Amino acid sequence: MYARSVTYQARPETIDEGVAYVRDEVMPGLMAMDGCTGLSMVCDREYGRAIITSAWSAQEGRDAREQMMLARRQRAAEIFRARPSVDFWDIAVVHRHAPSGEGARVRCTWLNLDTAGLTHAIDAYRMTMLPALEELEGFCSTSLMVDLANGRAVCTATFASRNAMESSRTAAEGLRSRFAKDVRATVTDTQEFELALAHLHLREMAWTKLS
């Protein structure tokens, strides 16, 4: 499985309009494309950051439809009053523990790591992080996506509510530190978001070999 994420450092006052545009225009267009398996959107209303992620069953399908999304991406840029930043990912781990609903929150952590150690990082995430995350109250799901070309990764953890996410911060910080040390990675950013749209249809997965 593969993903494309588009990030906007938006004006905070534009978030509602942007979410509505993605929900009503971008998502139906994407879901009509062969190979697209869904879309999610997270946003930070205080700081204005919005990230739209689409998932694809094949890398070729994702990349072949890049040009088709340019007009919608430009329209979103006009609404958010921000230029888009596009990242391409391999989806390495998907794990669902409980369903998420209205009010769910997402913590995203970005890392730099040696591409030679990616298989170990994926195994470590599956073997150590998943059981530890399941112990946190309100934990719903997690994913790990990797950028093979640039030695980058982003992991997400979804919680049922703002309170659940906030109460997990201390434990999550310890987990991040231990995981980064174990796989010799550098945490470059961590941010918490509202889960604005959740329509990703991904099977449970944990790869040990990447293409």
Image: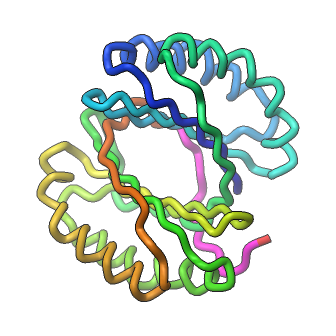
Regarding residue 126, the answer to whether it shows in the image is no
203 left or right of 161 in image: right
Does 81 lie within the magenta span? Answer: no
Q: Main secondary structure of the magenta part?
A: loop
Instruction: Relative to 201, say whether 81 is above or below.
Output: above
**Which residue is at 41% across, 36% downward?**
42
Instruction: Relative to 148, say whether 192 is above or below.
Output: above
**Which residue is at 37% across, 15% downward?**
16
Does 206 lie within the magenta span? Answer: yes
**Which residue is at 80% across, 70% downward?**
211
Instruction: Relative to 128, say whether 161 is above or below.
Output: above
What segment carries the magenta color? 199-210
48 vs 2, nearest the viewer: 48
Give the image quarter of residue 37: top right
Regarding residue 131, the answer to whether it shows in the image is yes
Q: Position of residue 32 (x, y in %)?
A: 74, 25
Quarter of the rendering occupied by the N terminus: bottom right
25 vs 111, nearest the viewer: 111
18 left or right of 48 in image: right
**Which residue is at 15% across, 52% downward?**
166
Q: Position of residue 134 (x, y in %)?
A: 29, 70
